[in-house]
Image: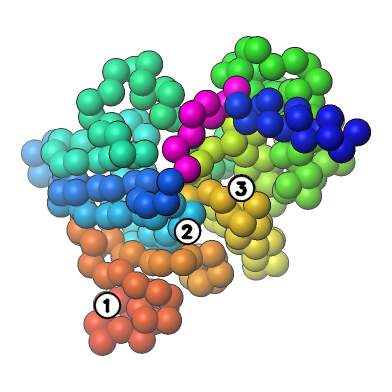
Amino acid sequence: MHLETNTIKQTVADHLNPGINTKAGPVINIKGLYKSFGKNTDILKGVDLTVKKGENLVVLGKSGSGKSVLIKCLVGLVAADKGELKVFDTDIATLNNQQLNAIRIRIGFLFQNSALYDSMTVRENLSFPLKRHSKKLTNKEVEQSVNEALESVGLKEAIDKMPSELSGGMRKRIGLARTLILRPEIILYDEPTTGLDTITSREISELILSIQKKYKTTSIIITHDMACAKLTGDRLVILKDGVMEAEGSYASLENSDDTWVRSFFI
């Protein structure tokens, strides 16, 4: 039985991520990234950023500093005006829609509101992306993947519930399980603890760490929650007016000589 389960897991992984490049090194490389919306609305003004394989990078910044625009450029939801943006050593700007979709399958995105389909059960919410992107999988393989994803977030018992029956923290977990179902190599977290109480926020932060270790994911975590940043971040960067103002460990930035940088940690 154990051998059969492992075989199913490998089959799912092969269908979802054929030919994954597992060599160490940066999986995200951004140079001179610019983005504006209109003549007088410059959002990103020459961002340089590298994210290593297996790293959790936390991005901090005041509202409107360009954090969400940065990760939308990363998956091609927003087209950059200028600069180089490479993911898996591939320049996003050079890809057609089919090639871009192939990259997107390897990138998971956890939205602030979890983005669950209210008319679907948890099982159906998780099965939907898997069936859409992996039509060759059998029903047994899909069911195995759904159960494993739910087990990874500690909510296997919620498989037949509707989203309306779940708490905010549970919805976040299910949203994360749905992200995991496609076995992404990169996960982008957009304010993963927003709207949650202190205890639940910590649980989500610990879950982000657990997923990093279990699945060897590379992550960018956008957050205003400094407890989340401290717990999850291998490295932190701070955006100010569209540029990278500071970079380093939590401890080094907390003790920075720059008063503005330290203000995030008060």
**What is the residue that sits farthest to the right in this orientation?**
1
Per the model, the C-alpha gap separating discs 2 and 1 is 23 Å
Q: Which amino acid, mark 3? A: Tyr
| Front-lying residue, 166 or 122 | 122
| Front-lying residue, 247 or 120 | 247
Magenta span dominant secondary structure: loop
In the rendered view of the protein, which quadrant contains the N terminus?
top right
Q: Which residues are magenta?
A: 15-22
> Which residue, given by chain and number where applicable, does mark 2 sit on?
56
> Which residue, given by chain and number where applicable, does mark 1 sit on?
260
Give the mark, 1 or 3, whose residue is nearer the N terminus.
3
**Above or below, 208 relative to 28:** below
> Which residue, given by chain and number where applicable, does mark 3 sit on?
215
Q: Is residue 154 magenta?
A: no
Give the mark, 2 or 1, whose residue is nearer the N terminus.
2
Q: Secondary structure at mark 3?
A: helix
For the residues carrying marks 1 and 3, which lies nearer the camera in this image?
3
The residue located at (65%, 12%) in the rendering is 136
Q: Quadrant of residue 90?
A: top left
The residue located at (68%, 25%) in the rendering is 11
Q: Quadrant of residue 98?
A: top left
Q: How is the image coloured?
A: rainbow
> Is residue 254 left or right of 108 when viewed as pictured?
left
Per the model, the C-alpha gap separating discs 1 and 3 is 36 Å
> Is residue 107 left or right of 4 when viewed as pictured?
left
**Above or below, 32 relative to 61:** above
Give the mark, 2 or 3, whose residue is nearer the N terminus.
2
